[in-house]
Amino acid sequence: MSDRVLCSIGAGAHEELLAHSGATFELYAACHGYDLDLRTELLAADRPASWSKVLLVRELLERYRTVFWVDADAAIVDPNRDIADELAPRAFLGLVAHRYGGQQIPNCGVMVVRRSRAARRLLDRMWARTTRREHPWWENAALLDLLGYEIPDDPRRPDAPPVRLVRPHRRLRRITFLDVAWNSIAAHEAEAPRIRHYPGRSHEHRLARLAADAAAARAAAGRAVQR
Ligand SMILES: [Mn+2]
């Protein structure tokens, strides 16, 4: 058993997405010596699916020193760097803050978590934040609250106020904001993505893009073996 794990959940219709994205996770795990924990069942059937990631990451921190979460609607397209090397020495969480529309929004679609009391506490507090259970950003909304961001109740409304960091929490000092290459999205795209993520897109769009990403990742891995 490794001290690092890469995990994700693709339940229901998302199982089909995970079939493609998971193929890219396998390549990454083999490349950097991670265990792989891919689930097709939710851990909390009484909450929207996204919340299950909080429980899975929390559970895996009991057994692993480093937990790397990637959403099932994201593919690792360049596995050459290990995300664990991107964390600052005292940081317990690494993630990308997307910048668009004058806002800066940390995104839980890709997260690397280092085992520590602070990490466990943050995940427990996210889970306890049941006021965000049905928010369109789910556990991501809970995280933004806990970091001191002010967020709209319904960010999908065209007149929604922007996300703003109004009460920066001291735990921000132990968070590494990763280069956007680690969570490249249409609204904030990396020039050379390591992970492509398709939030808010249709199932068909995600399926087609993830299938293409997985095929490209396999081909690149095949070329690396031949060299
Ligand atoms: Mn996602």
Image: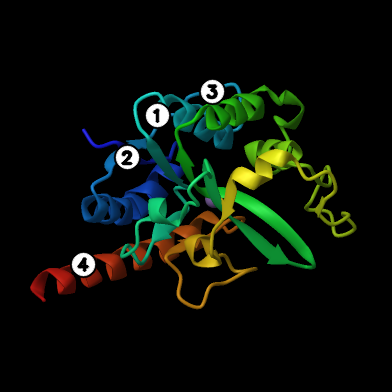
Asked if 44 appears above or below 98 in the picture, the reply is: above
Tell me the amino acid under the disc marked 4: Ala
Which residue has dot 3 on it? 45
Q: Position of residue 215 (x, y in %)?
A: 28, 67
Q: At 84% from the left edge and 47% from the top edge, which residue is drawn?
A: 152
Residue nearest the observer in this picture, 68 or 221: 68
Queried on whether the Cβ of the residue with tag 3 lies below 8 angstroms from ligand 1, the answer reads no
Disc 4/disc 2 C-alpha distance (Å)? 21 Å
Which residue has dot 2 on it? 4
Residue 60's tag is 1
Q: Badge 1: how crowded within 10 Å, few (<14), some, or many (20+)?
A: some
Q: Badge 2: how crowded within 10 Å, few (<14), some, or many (20+)?
A: many
Sequence-first disc among 4 and 1 = 1
Q: Position of residue 57 (x, y in %)?
A: 46, 33
Sequence-first disc among 4 and 2 = 2
Sequence-first disc among 3 and 4 = 3
Q: Is residue 133 visible?
A: yes
Residue 201 lies left or right of residue 88; in this view the side is: right
Q: In the displayed image of the protein, which residue is found farthest to the front?
A: 89
Q: Badge 4: how crowded within 10 Å, few (<14), some, or many (20+)?
A: some
Q: Quadrant of the N terminus?
A: top left
